[in-house]
Image: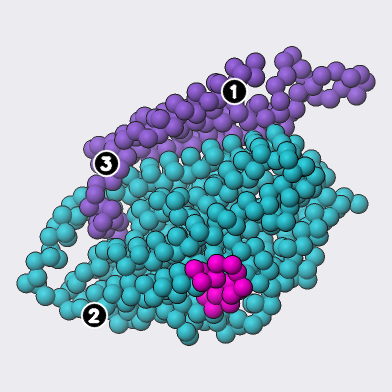
Chain colours: A purple, B cyan
Amino acid sequence: MEALVASAVGVLTAAGIFLILRRRTFPVILGLSLLTYAVNVFLFATGRLAVNAPAVLNKYEQVPYTDPLPQALVLTAIVISFGMTAVIVMIALGAYLSAKDDHIDMAARDSVDGAGEDA
Amino acid sequence: MNHWIVAPIVLPAILAPFIIMVLRYHLDLQRIFSVAGVVGLLGIALTITAQAAGGDIHVYELGNWPAPFGIVLVLDRLSAMMVLLTALLALPVVLYAIASGWDERGDHFHPLFQFQLMGVCGAFLTGDAFNLFVFFEVLLIASYGLMTHGGGAVRLKAGVQYVTYNLLGSTLFLFALGTIYSVTGTLNMADLALRVAEIPPEDTALLRVGAVLLLLVFCIKAAVLPLHFWLPASYANAPLPVAALFAIMTKVGAYSILRVYTLAFGPDVPATEGLLGDWLQPAALLTLAVGSIGILGTRHIARMVAFCAIASMGTLLVAISLFDETATAAALYYVYHSTLATALLFLVADLVMQRRGGAISPRPPMPQNGLIAALFFVGAIAMAGMPPLSGFIGKLLVLDATRDAPDATAIWAVVLIGSFVTIVGLARAGSLIFWKSYDPSTQDDPAPEAETAPEDADPAPPPPPEPQPGLAFTSVFGLVMGLVLLTLFAGPALDYTRATAAQLFAPEQYISAVLGGDE
């Protein structure tokens, strides 16, 4: 199971990094989502993998348990990454609609001269 | 328990939803409450700084859960002075945003501003690594809204880049925290320090990976060289008062490096020995060099100030990367100076851009040219580190502290040549913007104007409301006063930062305050 989880994290991360290096916003956002999935699975695995074990200690007998803290961390991470993806989709949509193209790079002259000229 | 510690987080956290839900349609009331909130934050910051100045470390257990299990907020000299700096910066910036009308060019400026303050103060106060991540996210979410405030195609595009880069940084942060947790089983910083010290030196590969990943995250925030690419475009395209507030965000990265790598992954802990200085110092020197070259090379005033911010982060991190007491005391003094000077230059750049556009090329003279030129001159002197102002003292302290370092020659050469290039770059920009008379027959000016104007001007920005130059200039002069006071009272300020550095390099006090504080 360790190999399965590890390779899943690896494949998700590799695909995410590949997509982030694309030139348009849509694949980049997909790549970010894949990366956040990868990190969520990774965080989940940091408490060691245990199957069919409750996330609470039992004080009456010695039974296997799984570490509850990574689950709490993962929950926080999921909420944050979900919200962040929504935010970047909205900003990218706004940029696409007002600039009429969805390249992630700025036009070359903006980077030289015209940055923030509208102030 | 000392409830003042949580106040800098709770006050903006309550005020922001209040503004957004109750005062949504009342801009005047929003302004009043926002300014009152910042003044209140300043009062709280002064109170907690006075409490921390005694040398005790105060711990606040959230939900009264004892330390390694619950999240703690920790108030020591360092976090108190950083919270105070946040409040000192926020007051002139919010006044300037109101006076220049930036806050009415889009919705929800003031709630986002308050959330940003909440995130920054929380990041400075927390004693838990995962909680640090959460407060990073709070300040980043608010900064996404502030950065794209007012809209416009170019700004939104820059916003997409900024958000993407920071989301990548957050993902990396989570990978780092996961790795560290899987090795040590804790994320409380004090507990982490104990566990890291217990790990046998031959078993630390994974921990070192985690520590380096964490350093990368903080370097992204601090815009250290290979990871600085997000900063110029983001800051130059953000509304400039917001960019002035963002001057504190790079310092959050520097603060985190200082906190985590003096407490948990310290230079004398065997597990992570020699991990940091070898990498951080060359990177900091390169940051300083590239920032200075950028100041010289740019053709837009906002980008120029953004490169000033990068260069000053370079100087700051040169001092931090030595990890000894004298250098850290100098760095902490330089943090105050660099934040105020960067913010001052951003506000002056906004004054210039409101009147004549930001291109560093001759244009017809603008109103209040002399006054703005004088303010730019003051800001440039401070930023470049010329004698009368605190930049000189700060750089002198940094140079003095690095005198015995192994690479002292390289550090001195880069800092001094970098300062010289900065002076040249700022002098060139200032004389082109304020002094060079406009000659309509030159061909090189109208062309870029005609090229950039349509794209920027047509979509979103509504006609700027009539500005209140009096208040705007007052807030800029407030920052100047801050720099002057920092110069005049350099002695007491240095006493404080020296005590802070001493406290940082004796982490036993921090650890026992956090872990033994449950009686």
Q: Are marks 3 and 1 on the same chain?
A: yes
Q: Is B57 in the magenta?
A: no
What amino acid type is highlighted by mark number 2?
Trp
Q: Residue B327 lies in what quarter of the image?
A: bottom right
The disc placed on residue A6 is 1
Mark 1 closeness class: few <14, some 14–19, many ≥20 residues within 10 Å: some
Q: Name the spot of residue B257 as percent of width and height, x first.
A: 61, 55
Tell me the residue that label 2 is attached to: B435
Residue on which disc 3 sits: A98
Q: Residues within 10 Å of mark 2 (few under 14, many from 20)?
A: some
Cβ–Cβ under 8 Å for marks 2 and 1? no
* Gap between marks 3 and 2 measured at Cα: 37 Å
Amino acid under label 1? Ala
What residue range appears in magenta? Answer: B394-411
Q: Is residue B221 left or right of residue A31?
A: right
- Amino acid carrying mark 3 in the image: Ser
Q: Chain of mark 2?
A: B
Which residue is depicted at the point 61% across and 64% down?
B322
